[in-house]
Image (cartoon, rainbow, N blue to C red):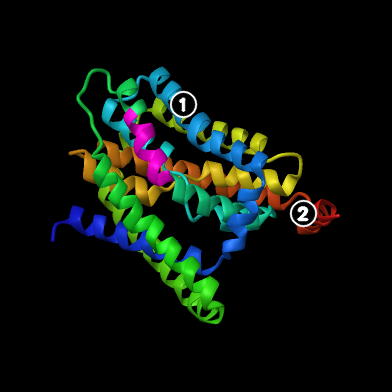
């Protein structure tokens, strides 16, 4: 087995396990509760499937990014529903139930939206290069390593909650180990390429992160806890899925390196913001918001 094949296998196993663990830890009612809030759902949908992808296109054109690297960033820009959203929301003192519900809904809707958006947007940044994403292959990847394991975890939690409670701690622990191993292997393999990324591209990535947080915050409504949840769920794109799609669609390391670079930028930036938010109003304020909302 080659190193690239090993990395791809690690990515598939890691993302599948993380989506399963996400499903084990949440209730179907979390997704139903978000789905019933039409304003919140519309705002989050527009933020994730309109604002972020089109902002990515504009920034990549302004940065005059390499077409292959631009393709990697675009892939990540359309891959929403990452399992890191709820933990970061909890760390920030946001409304975790909203982040969980949005993660489930975005992970499911990306089955259709991600291939469609790439079909529409990829030609805008290809600068004449004949770049195509294997839409059926992308659809299979999203179903196999994102949607099916998520639904399996949700089903266990819904019908066998005691079993889900027993399985969740080891699933979370295994996910941490897999994440660390996968990140280490990818960083060691692609470190020279990461050093070659142009400052303009890094600036575009940071700007895209700021835009993602801003549109998510605006889509979250008036309550601070809700805004934190939508902002962090929008800013964290699905790096594992993006890497699998980029590695399977394009020859050469440029697209994969771009996905990895933006993945690191968004994760570090979102984590620092979550830690900063945690220093602000505590969870008591969020609970007060929730009580006011019920009353």
Q: Residue farthest to the left?
A: 1
Secondary structure predominantly adopted by residues drawn in magenta? helix
How far across and how far down the image is residue 235, in percent? 53, 41
- Note whether 21 is above or below 190 in the view shown: below
Q: Nearer the viewer, residue 277 or 110?
A: 110
**Which residue does the image show at 24% across and 46% down from the upper left?**
137
Q: Is residue 108 left or right of residue 197?
A: right
- Note whether 77 is above or below 140 in the view shown: above
Is-magenta flag for residue 112? yes
Quick one: label 1, few (<14), some, or many (20+) residues within 10 Å?
A: some
Q: Nearer the viewer, residue 79 or 273?
A: 79
Q: Is residue 85 left or right of residue 54?
A: right
Q: Which residue is mark 1?
A: 54
**Which residue does the image show at 32% across and 63% down from the upper left?**
13
Q: Is residue 138 left or right of residue 161?
A: left
Considering the numbered disc 1 on the image, is that residue within a helix, a strand or a loop? Answer: helix
Quick one: label 2, few (<14), some, or many (20+) residues within 10 Å?
A: some
Q: Is residue 252 left or right of residue 30?
A: left
Visible residue check, residue 125: yes
Gap in angstroms between the C-alphas marked 2 and 1: 32 Å
**Which residue does the image show at 85% across and 52% down from the upper left?**
292
Q: Which residue is mark 2?
A: 286
For the record, the magenta segment spans 110-119
- Note whether 149 is above or below 4 in the view shown: below
**Which residue does the image show at 52% across and 50% down from the upper left?**
105
How far across and how far down the image is residue 56, in percent? 44, 28
Quadrant position of residue 101: bottom right
């Amino acid at each position: 087995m080659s190193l690239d094949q090993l990395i791809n296998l690690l990515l598939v196993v890691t993302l599948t396990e993380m989506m399963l663990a996400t499903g084990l830890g949440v209730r179907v009612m979390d997704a139903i509760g978000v789905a019933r809030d039409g304003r919140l759902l519309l705002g989050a949908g527009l933020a994730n499937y309109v604002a972020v992808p089109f902002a990515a296109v504009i920034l990549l054109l302004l940065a005059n990014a390499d077409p292959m690297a631009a393709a990697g960033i675009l892939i990540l820009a359309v891959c929403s529903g990452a399992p890191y959203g709820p933990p970061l929301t909890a760390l920030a003192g946001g409304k975790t139930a909203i982040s969980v519900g949005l993660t489930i809904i975005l992970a499911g809707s990306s089955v259709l939206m991600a291939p469609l958006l790439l079909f529409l947007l990829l030609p805008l940044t290809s600068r004449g290069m004949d770049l195509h994403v294997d839409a059926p292959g992308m659809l299979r990847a999203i179903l196999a390593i994102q949607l099916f394991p998520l639904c399996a975890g949700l089903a266990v939690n819904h019908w066998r909650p005691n079993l889900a409670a027993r399985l969740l701690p080891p699933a979370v622990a295994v996910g941490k180990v897999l994440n660390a191993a996968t990140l280490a292997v990818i960083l060691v393999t692609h470190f020279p390429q990461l050093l070659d990324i142009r400052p303009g591209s890094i600036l575009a990535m940071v700007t895209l992160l700021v835009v993602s947080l801003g549109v998510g915050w605006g889509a979250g409504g008036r309550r601070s806890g809700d805004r934190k949840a939508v902002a962090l769920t929008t800013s964290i794109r699905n790096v594992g899925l993006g890497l699998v799609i980029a590695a399977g669609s394009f020859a050469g390391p440029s697209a994969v390196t771009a996905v990895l670079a933006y993945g690191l930028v968004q994760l570090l930036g979102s984590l620092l913001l979550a830690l900063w938010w945690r220093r602000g109003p505590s969870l008591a304020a969020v609970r007060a918001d929730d009580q006011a909302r019920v009353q």
